[in-house]
Image (cartoon, rainbow, N blue to C red):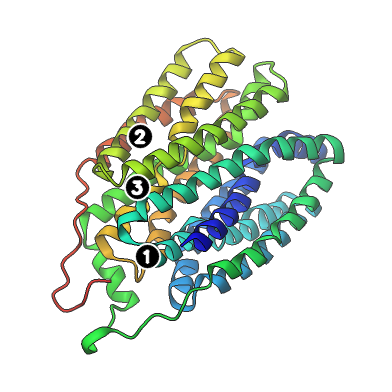
Amino acid sequence: MTQVLLCGAAVVTLSMGIRHGFGLWLQPITMDRGWTRETFAFALAVQNLAWGLAGPFAGALADRFGAFKVLIGGGLLYALGLITMALATSGLAFTGSAGLILGMAQSGTTYAVVYGVIGRQVDPAKRSWAMGVTAAAGSFGQFLMVPVETWLIGSAGWQNALFILGVAALAILPLAFGLREPKQPAAAHGAAPQTLREALREAFAHPPFLFLTAGYFVCGFHVVFIGVHMPSYLKDLGYGPEVATVALMLIGLFNVFGTYASGALGQRLAKRHILAAIYGLRALVILVFVLVPVTPWTVYVFAAAMGLLWLSTVPPTNAIVAQIFGVRHMSMLGGIVFLSHQIGSFLGVWLGGRIYDATGSYNLVWWISVALGIFAMLMNLPVRETAIARPALKAA
């Protein structure tokens, strides 16, 4: 279990850490290329959508053939996407690299694939905790990589910074060896294992799965809108890049504590209550931030509070999927739930750029974020966490 946790945590640290700082490139790239903010935002919106759309397929491949092969492919795509992102000279090429290639890369190197291995290799009694540990590692990567990326952009230029990160992404390949899984034993007593089609039919006919999926949409909207547009929002208010850098670092730092705590609490409390509380608190924190005057200290307090709630949705959401449906098709089902997250991400980052270009302000998007937090809280309250009954099949 230790090897799985260490390697899984390191993979997520790299994949999530690198992408957390993409908002730092918005200003230098758009100014250097003469693009609008919507051009950059649309490419990152496509990235999140491609990540979500590819997620169920990457998860199904990991469930069928093992996470190792998917992680190798994802690591190579990650390096390729970062390098071609640096070389793109048109909006279309930038969307293809920063959007499609990096989106597919992230589908094969982040939570759905890694959590599938954890779900199958870790004792169910420790599963929620183990997922919290891995998510906390990804959060530490966000904290660690933001100042590194800021320094790289400032010292080497934005293009060279992307080249360097492309090389760093290749470290995912050796880490993938630590996530190789033993072959699954044949089904006991001659019982036929559940097919992928049966798993999909079962999940979409189960209301708690739909409620969970709807709530996860909001998580994506919040984190990607804030992560990508916060640096530009603060610059518009007259603050230097150091304020945005500290804010993103605080999000990553407090995210470590929030994700670990939600995973640990998931062993003791109803996970649906944890999720409802997270989304309700997000709505409250954003509401207060919108209403109070913006100063560096209110930004830092907001970033710390949001950090506690940032990816703390990930361990309980994935643990509920495993608890209800078992772990045989966990990466694929987790990928489907995550697709909803990424549709929300697409809308969050794209609407942020679109509404800003149309109105010259992000205010409307902040208010949308408050309303969505309340919606997600209500969606998670009726989720039932009991394992689904399968008379004809043995539990996964």
User: Image quarter for residue 167?
Assistant: bottom right
Task: List the residue tagged with mark 3.
Answer: 316
| Label 3 residue SS | helix
Q: Are marks 1 and 3 in contact (CB under 8 Å)?
A: no
Q: Amino acid at mark 2?
A: Tyr
Task: List the residue tagged with mark 1.
Answer: 330
Is residue 357 visible in this depiction of the protein? no
Give whichever of 36, 330 is nearer the camera.
Answer: 330
Q: Position of residue 182 (x, y in %)?
A: 46, 78
Query: Total number of numbered labels?
Result: 3
Which of the two marks, 2 or 3, is nearer to us in this view?
3
Is residue 119 visible in this depiction of the protein? yes
Q: Residue at x 33, y 47 (%)?
A: 214
Residue 241 is left or right of residue 54, and the answer is right
Q: Position of residue 85 (x, y in %)?
A: 74, 53
How far apart marks 1 and 3 lie (CA) works out to: 14 Å
Residue 75 is left or right of residue 258, and the answer is right
How far apart marks 2 and 3 lie (CA) works out to: 13 Å
Q: Residue at x 78, y 35 (%)?
A: 151
Give whichever of 171, 58 is nearer the camera.
Answer: 171
Task: List the residue tagged with mark 2.
Answer: 279
